[in-house]
Image: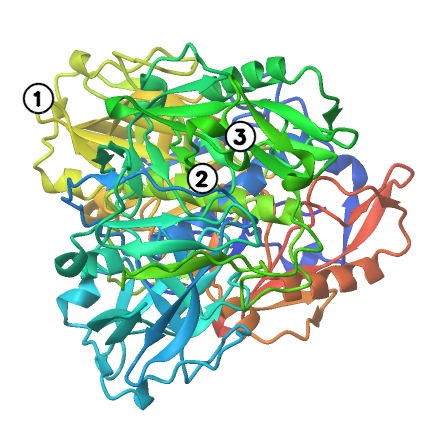
Amino acid sequence: MASSSSSPLSFYIFLNLLFFLLLIEKISLVSARELAGEHHVIDVKSLLPSSSCAVPEKGMSPSKLKVVHRHGPCSSLARQDKPSHVELLHQDQSRVDSINHRAATNAAGLNPVGDSLSARVPANTGAALGTGNYIVNIGLGTPSKPFSVVFDTGSDLTWTQCVPCDNCYTQKDPLYDPTQSSTFTNISCNSNYCTQLDQSSCSSTSTCLYQVQYGDNSQTQGSLIQDTLTFSSDTIPNFRYGCGHDNSGLFGKADGLLGLGREPASIISQTSQLYGKVFSYCIPSKSSYAGYLALGSSATGVQYTPMLNNPNLPSFYFLNLVGISVGGQRLDLSPTVFSVPGTLLDSGTVISRLPPTAYASLRKSFRQYMTNYPTAPALSILDTCYDFTNYQTVKVPSIALIFDNKVTINLDFTGILYVGSISQACLAFAGNNDASEVVIIEKISLVSARELAGEYDIIEVKSLEDSIEGLFCSVPDKGTSPSKLNVVHRHSLCSSQARQDMSSHVELLRRDQARVDYTHHRAANAAARLNPIGGSLLAEVPTNIGRPLGTDNYIIDIGLGTPTKSFSVVFDTGNDLTWTQCVPCVNCYTQKDPFYDPNQSSTFTSISCNSNYCTQLDRFGCSSNSTCLYQVEYERDSYTNGSLIQDTLTFSSDTIKNFRYGCGHNNNGQFGQADGLLGLGRGAVSIISQTDQLYDKVFSYCLPSGSRAIGYLKLGKPVPDVQYTPMLTNSNLPSFYFLKLISISVGGARLALSPTVFTGPGTILDSGTVVSYLPPTAYSALRNIFRKEMTNYPTAPPLYNLDTCYDFTNYPDVEVPAIALIYDGEMTTNLDARL
């Protein structure tokens, strides 16, 4: 029987570089004698958890701590109501998703450039349709070449697909070739125009390179150039935009995108001298209509409300929504319900999103008005739907949005109902997940008083669906404005890109939700001032030993303050900041130990927000008394907020003076009853970096192999006779430890996989995940071989995301094929079967 506690391997920790997406949760080495040929021989009873604790001999070095699983019998935090396996795996998947998202978002060099525009912009008119991707025709180059592009008020950079194109989706028009234009020039990566981009880099020829990632996993990459833009009949010389050489996603057959956001790269900012940063648009209310996009002075007779800025989402247009009325009656809602998160107007969403309280109130009132109609099943996220099959006309309560300056906008019925079919017409609003998320108004449609019948709109049912017979496009009079473009829905009869295979309503809503989630995540992430502090030291790193258990949150005891107070904290190799819950605590979860009171320590001092220690944090701010404030968000809605302080840390019997950590006054999430967290990551604020003079950025840990066992965490030199493989760094995930995995063997046979399967995304060693995650190709190969080796055993149903399970009920012991991970330098690690 394998014993993972017999030969612990250490972790030599320094700092350097690679990429990501593959997660190895933990590695446990076993010696050759523990293998029976190409298989492990396992006592099935050993797979079951134990209820007693096996504590090793104390002989610990001064810088070595015992490690226990927080739900095991060795933990002082063990609970009777510990999570189920499904919950654990769900939490585990959440962590993986969080890491992947951090990789995607942190790849952006977020440099928000605040827009100082305080001008007033007229309320726009239009209604939602389909995916919310609307097409305009622009011209590029000299001579001008026409291109059909989607426009987006939430994006800044304009771009089109260009030759040469390494990876392009199919578009209707020929790819743009800038070399055929007499007015084309490249932009240098040393130019201010390049540094204004969210994500920019430099080519070998010093040309500025850009990258933009959108919320639905669409993306574009290429070079930043300038050329002449033709907008209707206006000519805009030296317009800066992206020439996309690698593009993918949900753009249909559009040639690119026109960015109408508020940042310097947008067409609005670039043409500020010409149009005064003023634009208006009318979205077509039906697919057989065309709307318009106009730059410059708006029409007469419009209503005005102040436009606001949000530094967390500088590209978007914010208004001050103060109330909503249904059927002429204002809902009983405080204006702060909307003003605290903010309200943005967005051309790219289909469904308006409201704070939970506001949506619940709106929905309740709307349903009361609609009791005469039969309900229909929910449509994706839309939970208030009706069947109008047997009705020629229906009465729908009017809905009005009330903005600052008492501007009231009555929504057209197309802004009130989202119609999947006549038998499934739904309220076109949804609630946000929580009150802190921004309010999103998908579009505003103005209607005159004559279109209202008292408290209701009178709607002809046939008008809810586009007529099949209406095989023509109704284009409005273009008018005389040279800066006015037609706008059509990309799947409509008016679009040159109309397709027969349009996306389903569910798919459209799924994409819409992806966009909303991305917007919310951008708001959260942009609030962080991301300043990753990368390590520059090269090192060889031995593999670590241990195995996951439960949620994979492992507990250690540390001491804080003078005199020292003991605290039980989880440790995490993927996070940097150490923190504990402190008094005064505005919002704290329940923990077993008393909260830490730094004022009771003679060695405690606050850290100024002007200190370099403060600016090293990912997210920091300044209190009214100039104390450094921090914020950290984890997966599963866990977070900690508080002040950065320094005090004495006691680690086993070692004393570490002036240790910087977080004093959490507002904390929430999946920490059980742990008092906080010890950050073992690679950032400047981690304990590894702060103690580099003492321990040379070297640490090792052995995770307990079962609930009865105890592992350890050690700072300083590793034990002898360990194996080494180079450690890498990844600038997108600077806190994590990366290795170069090159292959896997099953049953002694190496899988037929190219090393690039692993090296492309990169391989993380993480203390916080339960299951190892592989690229699809590698997992498929591993699973196929493993299943062939296990054909003698009955299968069991999948367990959450684990799809290869077996029933060992009637077996005293079982044979499992050996699995080994092979790293750079051919270092081979045989996994313990009980991983």
Instruction: Give above or below for 261 relative to 242.
Output: above
Residue, disc 2: 442
Instruction: Give above or below for 76 relative to 150.
Output: above
Query: In x, y percent, where is residue 824?
Result: 48, 71
C-alpha gap between disc 2 and disc 1? 41 Å
- Quick check: can you spot residue 191? yes
The secondary element bearing badge 2 is classed as loop
- Name the amino acid, label 3: Ala
Residue nearest the viewer, comparing 636 with 132: 132
Q: Which residue is rendered at x = 22% and y = 52% of the image?
A: 111
Circle number at residue 625: 1
Q: Which residue is rendered at x = 42% and y = 73% of the image?
A: 147
Circle number at residue 430: 3
Residue nearest the viewer, comparing 743 with 295: 295
C-alpha gap between disc 3 and disc 1? 40 Å
Query: In x, y percent, where is residue 88?
Result: 61, 33
Neighbours of disc 1 within 10 Å: few (<14), some (14-19), many (20+): few
